[in-house]
Amino acid sequence: MTKLRNSTILITGGASGIGLLLGQQGLLRGARRLIIWDINPQTLQQVTQQLTAQGHEVHAFVVDVASPDAVEATAQQVISTIGVPDVLFNNAGIVVGKLFAEHSYAEIQRTLDINVLGVMTVARAFLPAMLQRGSGHIVNIASAAGLIPNPRMSVYAASKWAVLGWSESLRLELEALRQDLHVTTVTPSYIDTGMFAGVKAPLLTPILKPEAITEAILAAVEKNKAILRRPALVHLLPLLRGVLPARLFDTIVGRGFRVYTSMDKFAGRPATTAVPAQPEEDTTNT
């Protein structure tokens, strides 16, 4: 089982939202040091000062995970000066939240660069050192959006479908090595952090509380769980999509459970509080 006590944790998008909560709770569970990657220097500095004042060892790096060169250079700096992380949380991500025809090419590119290539690039930067050491745990914050289509979520859903397939494939590759190497894929529905402000929760799928999903993620890591799905109804999505014809699935799940209209009034994070260009992955969608 993965031990958070005395571990070194690295979190991308770790200066706010779920990323920040994961760092705070990881430290409270006994992590020795926390490494935060974030694109927002002001928020990063504030969080680092607060946690350091509480007596924790925190290392902060301004990194855009959409830049492979920046990721690789910073990863090598971390490895050489701090050490190889024991647990890596791939948490950074963005959402646009509009009809596909309304997306600009830049929005499509940026979403895929951060949500897909960024996740893979960060994992690739640290994986050789983890393999050499023979231990490590990679946690990929995907989404229930990787299990179901949803209007106004096409590019975001595509990115999370990609992360889900890649993360599970990586898990199988590492398990075949029979070392202390693990991958946990997290597929939550909407989380009440503000990133998806304005959404309406689907029927029987409550909006998740940040503290509760954070605790569930850390518990899943400590138990080396392969996949964490929240809330409970998310467990049924693969089964229902497998047994129901597409149109019937649309009628029962998409429209009956009001999944397909959940983004109709999406507003997103207010401009005054939004993290520029790359907010943390602090909530996901069914």
Image: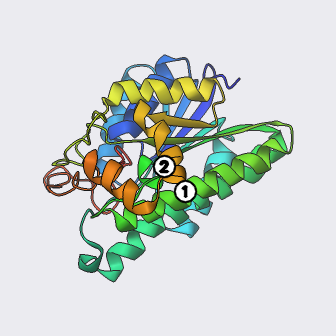
Picture coordinates of residue 122 (x, y %)? Answer: 59, 56
* Amino acid type for the residue under numbered disc 1: Val
Does residue 90 show up? no
Choose top left, top right, bottom left or bottom right for residue 111.
bottom left
Asked whether 84 or 107 is in front, the reply is: 107
Relative horizontal placement of residue 73, taking residue 50 as reference (left or right): right
* Amino acid type for the residue under numbered disc 2: Ala
Q: Are marks 1 and 2 in contact (CB under 8 Å)?
A: yes
Q: Is residue 168 above or below residue 23?
A: below
Question: Disc 1 and disc 2: Cα gap in Å?
Answer: 6 Å
Picture coordinates of residue 179 (x, y %)? Answer: 84, 37
The coloring applied to the image is rainbow
Residue under numbered circle 1: 163
Residue under numbered circle 2: 142
Does residue 30 show up? yes
Element type at mark 1: helix
Asked whether 86 or 218 is in front, the reply is: 218
Residue drawn at x 63%, y 31% is: 225
Picture coordinates of residue 178 (x, y %)? Answer: 86, 38
Picture coordinates of residue 51 (x, y %)? Answer: 39, 27
Q: Is residue 4 above or below residue 147?
A: above
Choose top left, top right, bottom left or bottom right for residue 212.
top left
Q: Is residue 68 above or below residue 62?
A: below
Number of marks in the rendered image: 2
Q: Which tag, 1 or 2, sits closer to the chain's start?
A: 2
Residue drawn at x 47%, y 18% is: 28
**Image quadrant where one finds the N terminus:** top right
Asked whether 69 or 144 is in front, the reply is: 144
Residue drawn at x 33%, y 39% is: 17
Relative horizontal placement of residue 57, taking residue 79 as reference (left or right): left
